[in-house]
Amino acid sequence: MQFAQLNGITLHYQIIGGPSEKPAIVFVNSLGTDFRIWRDVIVRLVGNYPVVAYDKRGHGLSGLGSPPYAMADHVADLEALLDHLEISQAVICGVSVGGMIAQGLAAKAPERIRGLVLCDTGHKIGTDELWNERIAAVEKDGIEAISDNILDRWFSKGFRAEKPAEYQGYANMLTRQPVCGYVGTSVALRDTDYTESTSKLVMPTLCVVGEEDGSTPPALVEELAGLIPGAEYQVIQNAGHLPSIEQPDRLANLIKRFLTRLLASDNQNLET
């Protein structure tokens, strides 16, 4: 396990080395999870690219800081982690709130972002009413009180029916996150609208969504892709909000293809 003191909190991260001439791929997890959700994608990329995964503040083994948070806090943490690891060029792969953190850093420091993989996310997620209701419910009765509803949005019907042990495991992950970290990040999601800043992004971008995503449905992710010139949009069948869990082969292959094209474009630009 690897830890760093950044922005006044402890961040838990993992770095796996790869070819130095290639950009690092940095994975950012969703609300109510830790970086283990990326494991089955990461193992399919290891050796070909440097890989970083981390628990955002208020989640996993990272510190709580001072919730509630602004999205700018999460963005600053990711930027500080890249500084700490001396990564100057990265492809950020974020799911849900992780995708919003990726958008925020891309707008703040575009020179550091070689590309974006925006997975099951949006430029604006949910309404004030939705987030206020969720925050109130969690503060009153804990995450477990809303977990069934959240898990139904996260996973496809097939996964819920066919993999009960895995389903229960991810339920445990959700309900064992710190309440104040969950609520703090919910506030950040409620208060963030990246429509304007994301529409100004120009880096290569892949937008991916699970066909059965009930949290950030395909229509939202397609709208996000439409904001970014040249962004690619892909739907993953038989997956909900977390394709890295349900369809890691398919997601990893999409990422590999995206990275191959990105590096080919780099080489072509060098030759010309």
Image (spheres, rainbow, N blue to C red):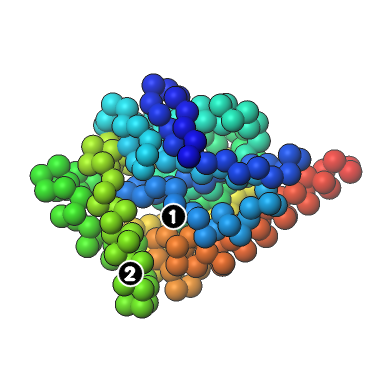
Q: What is the residue that sits farthest to the left in this orientation? A: 140
- Write down the residue under mark 1: 37
Say which residue appears at 84% left-offset and 47% top-offset: 268
Q: Is residue 185 visible?
A: yes
Q: Amino acid at mark 1?
A: Ile
225 or 35, which lies in front?
35
Residue 269 image offset from top left, x and y in percent:
82, 43
Look at 33% across and 59% down and name the residue there: 170
Q: Choose between 89 and 56: the one closer to the eye.
A: 56
Residue 207: % across, % down: 53, 55
Find residue 188 and report its horizontal and vertical position in percent.
32, 37
Which corner quadrant holds the C terminus? top right
Q: Amino acid at mark 2?
A: Ala
Q: Nearer the viewer, residue 270 or 223?
A: 270
Q: Secondary structure at mark 2?
A: helix
Establish if 193 lies above or below 73: below
The dot on residue 242 is: none
186 left or right of 44 in image: left
Q: Which of the 4 quarters of the picture holds residue 202?
A: top right
- The residue at the far right in this view is 271
Going 44% across and 48% down the picture, which residue do you hit?
A: 35
Residue under the image location 10 percent in, 44 percent down: 140
Q: Quadrant of residue 189?
A: top left
- The numbered mark at residue 165 is 2
In this picture, residue 262 sits left or right of residue 128: right
Sequence order check, earlier mark of 1 and 2: 1
In the image: residue 177, left or right of residue 5: left
Q: CA distance from mark 1 to mark 2?
A: 15 Å
